[in-house]
Amino acid sequence: MTRDSDADALRARLPAAAHAWLSEATATVTDHPDRIDTLLAVAGRACGRGTLPGGPAAPAWSTDDAVRVLLLTGLPCGGHELAALLIRLYRHGEAAERRGILRSLSFFGAPHALGARAMPLVEDALRTNDARLVTAALGDYARRHLDAPAFHHALLKCVFLGIPLATVAPPPEPDAPELLRMLSDYAAERRAAGRPVPPDIEPFLSTSAVAEKE
């Protein structure tokens, strides 16, 4: 699926009222990009914060998440200018705005030439203990630009925070020895303390057990 089709699928799930507001707001951003701050701030009040129906953007997407992503990807800039704008918006934004900015990173296509310039935002989100920010940060953009050890530590943080690994896009492949070791150690600590092991890491533990036998 292309980024354009991802955006189209996201837009198709918006409620009618959000569609109407977004159309006007997108036109405003195109002509007056300096108004993006205000529009991001009011997106939740204008369009609602309900959970979107299932699809490529699910789970854990809200209407205001989607609206902010579509507004940001309508900005008429790219490269260093876009990265600097996103960093400024993130630093001054509230949690919901930061979440939308993080989610938008995976939707910028080649014309925007964003590259890895927005990785400081991903790294900042991964230093927090805010599960919604961490989830938003770990989209396709992070998967492309984080090296393997950093991505594996991010997945382990998801487990610590109770974030289901199925919400991380794309799903991690259970073929990394270091990741399997970390998850196995974590599971062993949980069992030793008489605490349950999160069920979504069981497939990784099974893979690890097979690898050890070989």
Image: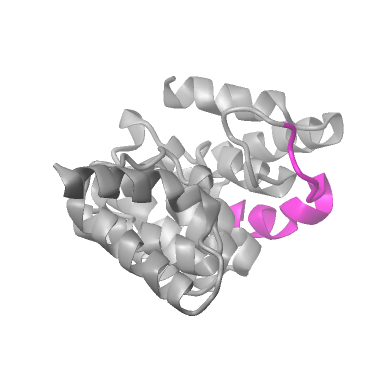
Residue 99 part of the magenta segment: no
Q: Quadrant of residue 187?
A: bottom left
The answer, for residue 44, to whether it is visible in the render is yes
Q: Quadrant of residue 87?
A: bottom left
Please name the residue shown 56% across and 65% down the image. 196
Q: Residue furthest right?
A: 17
**Seen in the image, is 122 located left or right of residue 177?**
right
Q: Dividing the image into 4 quarters, which one contains the C terminus?
A: top left
Q: Nearer the viewer, residue 129 or 107?
A: 129
Please name the residue shown 50% across and 49% down the image. 200
**Seen in the image, is 82 located left or right of residue 212?**
right
Q: Is residue 62 above or below residue 197?
A: above
The answer, for residue 88, to whether it is visible in the render is no
Residue 33 lies, in percent from the top left, at 54, 48
Residue 77 lies, in percent from the top left, at 40, 42
Please name the residue shown 38% across and 69% down the image. 188
Residue 48 part of the magenta segment: yes
The rendered magenta stretch, by its main secondary structure, is classed as helix
Residue 185 lies, in percent from the top left, at 32, 68
- Residue numbers of the magenta segment: 35-53
